[in-house]
Amino acid sequence: MKLLETLNWRYATKRYDSSKKISPSALEEIKTAIQLAPSSYGLQLYQVLHIKDTQLREQLKAAAYQQPQLTEAAELFVFCHFDDATPQHIDRYIELKAKTQAVPKETLLAYGETMKGSIVDLPKEQKQIWMAKQVYIALANGITASANLGIDSSPMEGFDKAAFDEILDLKSKGLQSAVILALGYRSEEDETQHQTKVRKPLEELFTSI
Ligand SMILES: Cc1cc2nc3c(=O)[nH]c(=O)nc-3n(C[C@H](O)[C@H](O)[C@H](O)COP(=O)(O)O)c2cc1C
């Protein structure tokens, strides 16, 4: 399918056919697309939890207003950002960059300090908003990659974040939940798939200045 056809095919799936599973290779491809998302400075100040435990998924569903995707979808991911952006995160990125690109770490230290200078002392809440925004880019990559494979998805924010953080013990992991991504195959009974997409016309969405 061409990209626009694919993007028209996808929709925020409400009901999944839970008998259909995603192949390991397709799942790996979606994860890799999420990994390849751009992020500010490349820091990737987030983590994606792959929730496999069925009991945990039931608990999360209760904290997500009983939305059926939480338990019907083949796979469930909770995208989280870090609770804080710290000098240690930047040091770890510098180490990874040095190793990956086979350059001496010393040549990157000044760059690391520049990043620390612009990030670390910002108010914590501002940092959290900044990190959360980037999680959504990774989410979008996951949605598009899934559609490209003919796999349905549901981005979801309709959940009690405090309850999710508690259930998943995120505080101890230095994380905060941001958004859910459910993946699987649409149920024939999901009426939403037949609804025409509602989007603003391009002339309204874009303004030429
Ligand atoms: C960040 C975000 C959060 C969303 N949260 C929910 C949700 O909790 N439950 C739900 O059924 N749909 C949710 N949606 C789906 C949107 O309602 C849907 O994307 C929108 O109506 C456009 O429809 P389409 O994606 O099917 O084209 C969410 C979408 C986004 C991007």
Image (cartoon, grey):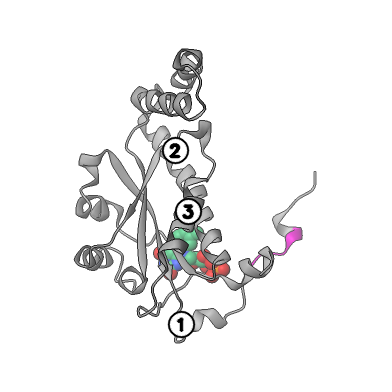
What's the magenta bit mostly, secondary-structure-wise?
A: loop
Task: Report the span colored magenta.
Answer: 198-203
Q: What residue would you read off at disc 1?
A: 190
Q: Position of residue 46 (x, y in %)?
A: 39, 42
The kind of residue on which mark 2 rests is Gln
Q: Residues within 10 Å of mark 1 (few under 14, many from 20)?
A: few
Tell me where residue 178 appears, x and y as whole percent: 38, 50
Q: CA distance from mark 2 to mark 3?
A: 12 Å
Residue 122 in view here? no
Give left or right: position of 187 versus 50. right
Indicate yes or no: mark 3 CB to ligand 1 under 8 Å.
yes
Instruction: Note whether 142 is above or below 128 in the view shown.
Output: below
Q: Nearer the viewer, mark 2 or mark 1?
A: 2
77 magenta-colored: no
Residue 200 lies in magenta, yes or no? yes
For disc 2, the marked residue is: 44
Upstream in the sequence, badge 2 or badge 1?
2
The residue tagged 3 is 139
For the point 73% across and 53% down, the residue is: 206
Q: Nearer the viewer, residue 151 or 178?
A: 151
